Image (tube, rainbow, N blue to C red):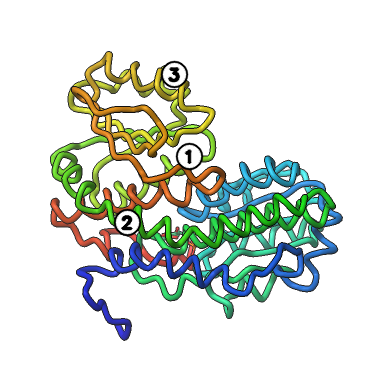
């Protein structure tokens, strides 16, 4: 490919480390929050919308799930998130006050594009896309858009496209809130400040690579892994599991931690690594009791926490602490070590990281 690897061994590794730059580029030019940053038709739609329907596939779908947490908590607008291949084929109830939002790295994924056209056929005319390719079909066929500036993503397993989608979704939550007249100047300033500081914080988290590498050694001979999270970090657990299965071929499942006792706990024994995404938020105490449930069955915990949490390593509990708790934007930081864990585990297993078997970068046929 014409894009050089520089000092990196794989495109995926390069793209993981490009994320601070990708986020900075994606946010460049955003001075204040307004609907207009999503295009001239956006402010009107944001004022009018009563609901949001997010449609996507794969990693972009998980970004959408996190978008739901943000849009509901910040803009107070109800959000549904659907897998494109499900939405396009089911009999749904169209709602003309719903903003239809597709999320796609490529803007060409067949199911997502077909789902968008399906929504339009049903009469929903408020359409928008968050997309990494400005010239794509999805951008052409929607009224509003936000172009992420991840740059060309070559690794089949999406990394920088995902985190830039999240940055765009956070902006969207704020922009809807603003157009609805509910965003206080204080909140707006604080959000801009936090977004601007994000690349620096991401750099610091990425420096934890050596520690994560030692965990990868422990993972490489496993056949299964569970990933747990709660709230906006539940989709991060799903994404961590997806990354691991895509490139290392270890069977991995992401679960909302509260569902552990409704099934996956039956799988937990001394051979089951359980990755826990555990930022120090209002759900931490709940998560700690889920962790005890795992330990009681001899499951080995790999916990990604952060500085302020009092989770300490002990027998069967490995802990890596991210340097700070980042509040609302924490999912953007917490996905980084999961990407690195999958990457290094795949390296130990010797799989083709950039081109995993059976998978394509962009699925443009059904
Ligand atoms: C493929 C890729 C994934 C991606 C998904 C959706 O499965 O391997 O990395 O998340 O397609 O692609 P999109 O371009 O629509 O985001």
On the image, numbered disc 2 is attached to which residue?
A: 206
- Assign a secondary structure to mark 2: helix
Give residue 103's position: percent from left, percent from top.
58, 60
Q: Earlier in the sequence, mark 2 or mark 3?
A: 2
Gap between marks 2 and 1, in whole Å? Answer: 18 Å
Indicate the quadrant of ligand 1 in the picture.
bottom left
Residue at the far top: name it.
296
Q: Residue at x 82, y 52 (%)?
A: 49
Gap between marks 2 and 3, in whole Å? Answer: 34 Å
Q: Earlier in the sequence, mark 3 or mark 1?
A: 1
Crowdedness near tag 3: few (<14), some (14–19) or many (≥20) residues, C-alpha within 10 Å = few
* 251 or 33, nearer to the observer: 33
Q: Residue at x 57, y 73 (%)?
A: 28
- Assign a secondary structure to mark 1: helix
Q: Nearer the viewer, mark 3 or mark 1?
A: 1
Give residue 42's position: percent from left, percent from top.
78, 66
Ligand 1 within 8 Å of disc 2? The answer is no
User: CB atoms at circles 3 and 1 under 8 Å apart?
Assistant: no
Crowdedness near tag 1: few (<14), some (14–19) or many (≥20) residues, C-alpha within 10 Å = many
Crowdedness near tag 2: few (<14), some (14–19) or many (≥20) residues, C-alpha within 10 Å = some
- Assign a secondary structure to mark 3: helix
* 185 or 18, nearer to the observer: 185
Gap between marks 3 and 1, in whole Å? Answer: 19 Å
On the image, numbered disc 3 is attached to which residue?
A: 262
Side of 48 where 363 appears, left or right: left
Give residue 166's position: percent from left, percent from top.
54, 56
Residue 353 higher or lower than 249, as above or below: below
Give residue 196's position: percent from left, percent from top.
54, 62
On the image, numbered disc 1 is attached to which residue?
A: 233
Side of 112 where 351 appears, left or right: left
* Residue 276 figure quarter: top left
């Amino acid at each position: 490919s014409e894009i050089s690897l520089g000092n990196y061994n794989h495109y995926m590794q390069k793209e993981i480390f490009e994320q601070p730059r990708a986020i900075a580029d994606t946010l460049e030019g955003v001075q204040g929050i307004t609907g207009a940053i999503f295009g001239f038709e956006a402010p009107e739609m944001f004022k009018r919308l009563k609901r949001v329907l997010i449609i996507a596939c794969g990693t972009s779908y998980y970004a959408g799930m996190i978008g739901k947490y943000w849009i509901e908590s910040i803009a107070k607008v109800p959000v549904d998130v659907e897998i494109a291949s499900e939405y396009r084929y089911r009999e749904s109830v169209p709602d003309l006050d719903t903003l239809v939002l597709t999320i796609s790295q490529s803007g060409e994924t067949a199911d997502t594009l077909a789902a968008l056209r399906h929504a339009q056929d049903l009469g929903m005319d408020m359409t928008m896309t968050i997309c990494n390719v400005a010239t794509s079909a999805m951008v052409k066929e929607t009224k509003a858009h936000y172009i992420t500036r991840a740059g060309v993503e070559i690794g089949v397993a999406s990394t920088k496209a995902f985190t830039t989608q999240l940055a765009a979704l956070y902006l969207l939550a704020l922009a809807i809130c603003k157009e609805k007249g509910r965003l206080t100047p204080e909140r707006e300033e604080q959000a801009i400040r936090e977004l601007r500081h994000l690349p620096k914080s991401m750099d610091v988290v990425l420096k934890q690579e050596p520690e994560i590498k030692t965990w990868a050694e422990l993972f490489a001979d496993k056949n299964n892994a569970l990933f747990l999270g709660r709230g906006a970090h539940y989709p991060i657990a799903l994404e961590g599991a997806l990354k691991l299965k895509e490139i290392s071929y270890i069977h991995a499942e992401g679960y909302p931690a509260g569902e552990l006792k409704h099934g996956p706990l039956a799988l937990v024994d001394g051979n089951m690594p359980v990755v826990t995404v555990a930022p120090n938020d209002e759900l931490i105490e709940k998560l700690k009791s889920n962790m005890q449930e795992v330990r009681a069955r001899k499951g080995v915990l790999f916990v990604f926490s952060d500085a302020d949490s009092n989770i300490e390593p002990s027998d069967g509990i490995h802990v890596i602490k991210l340097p700070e708790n980042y509040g609302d934007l924490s999912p953007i930081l917490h996905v980084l070590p999961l990407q690195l864990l999958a990457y290094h585990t795949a390296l130990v297993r010797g799989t083709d990281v950039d081109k995993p078997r059976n998978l394509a970068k962009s699925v443009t046929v059904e």
